[in-house]
Image: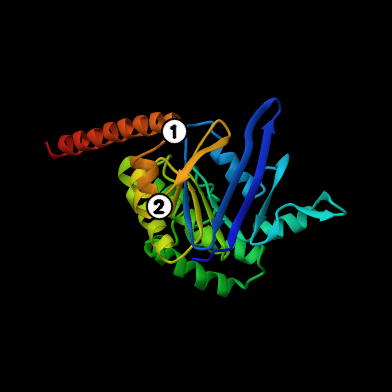
Amino acid sequence: MSDKPLVHAVNVHKAFGPTIVLKGVDLDVVAGEVVCLLGPSGSGKTTFLRCINQLETIQGGRIWIDGELAGYEEKDGRLHRLHEKRIAAQRREIGMVFQRFNLFPHMTALENVMEAPVQVRGRSKAEAEKRGLELLERVGLSDRCDYYPAQLSGGQQQRVAIARALAMDPKLMLFDEPTSALDPELVGDVLKVMRELAQAGMTMIVVTHEMGFAREVADRVVFMDDGVVVEQGAPLDIINNPQHERTKSFLSRIRKENDENAAALEARAAAEKL
């Protein structure tokens, strides 16, 4: 893991109309680090990810990705918005996996993975196909390469979405609650792929409510609420011994929800045996 920040965000602000969503977020993520963002709905986690990937335009502060100012260039002490082509070039270096899988429904799993390398990177179809098959095997779906999204489970679609993001050879992967739209029994396969990515050294920022994943895989946990970073630190410190009352309240609620989900799964499994 490098000491140099791959992501360097300083005093990031973002509002939608009169609603201020980010109120001065500072965050550094070094190359090879896995950072999990925790927090209640509306705390600004997803918006912050979208700002890193320039799907949203920040209104204050700055974000650097691998030493390059994202979305702007500085001239004579003033910021100037980059042309959309240069922004798109910066965005190519970042993979993003969304809550909803956003696969092209008219394309097979392999075609979904091949599309961006061919259309954006200019790779040959043969090269993209070879790499696509390797990535589908990596996420455990080599036998589903000719299936269309409608023929795949939610967990399988999300794993295709991860393979699609990896096909662009990103230096950074962003995950926006990648398991939140899945049935509980499908979550494990997606988290397994993410664990393997982390073990391989991929830099990852993950918005999640999966406390087990955060505890086991994250190098650092960041708790956000009301548009600010409330506290951050090692996973065991934040999850097991939070210092702020807002963090304590959130984690207590999440533990209760996880216990209820586990009980529901056990009840379903017992009913299926009857």
Image coloring type = rainbow
168 or 197, which lies in front? Answer: 197
Q: Secondary structure at mark 2?
A: helix
257 or 165, which lies in front? Answer: 257
Q: Secondary structure at mark 1?
A: loop
The x and y percentages for residue 138 are 41, 65
Mark 1, residue position:
244
Q: Where is 269 relative to 35, above or below? A: above
Amino acid type, callout 1:
His
Residue at far right of view: 76
Amino acid type, callout 2:
Gln
| Residue at mark 1 to residue at mark 2: CA–CA distance | 38 Å
State the residue at coordinates (48%, 59%). Answer: 33
Within-10-Å neighbours for mark 1: few <14, some 14–19, many 20+: few
Q: In the figure, is residue 98 to the left or right of 11? A: left
The x and y percentages for residue 143 are 37, 63
Q: Is there CB contact under 8 Å for labels 1 and 2?
A: no
State the residue at coordinates (43%, 60%). Answer: 198
Q: Where is 165 relative to 102, above or below? A: below
The x and y percentages for residue 135 are 46, 66
Residue at far front of view: 243
Mark 2, residue position:
156
The x and y percentages for residue 188 are 33, 50
Can residue 242 be seen in this snapshot?
Answer: yes
| Sequence-earlier tag: 1 or 2 | 2
Q: In the figure, is residue 262 to the left or right of 234? A: left
Can residue 177 be seen in this snapshot?
Answer: no
Q: Where is 246 relative to 45, above or below? A: above
Residue at far left of view: 274
Q: Quadrant of residue 249?
A: top left
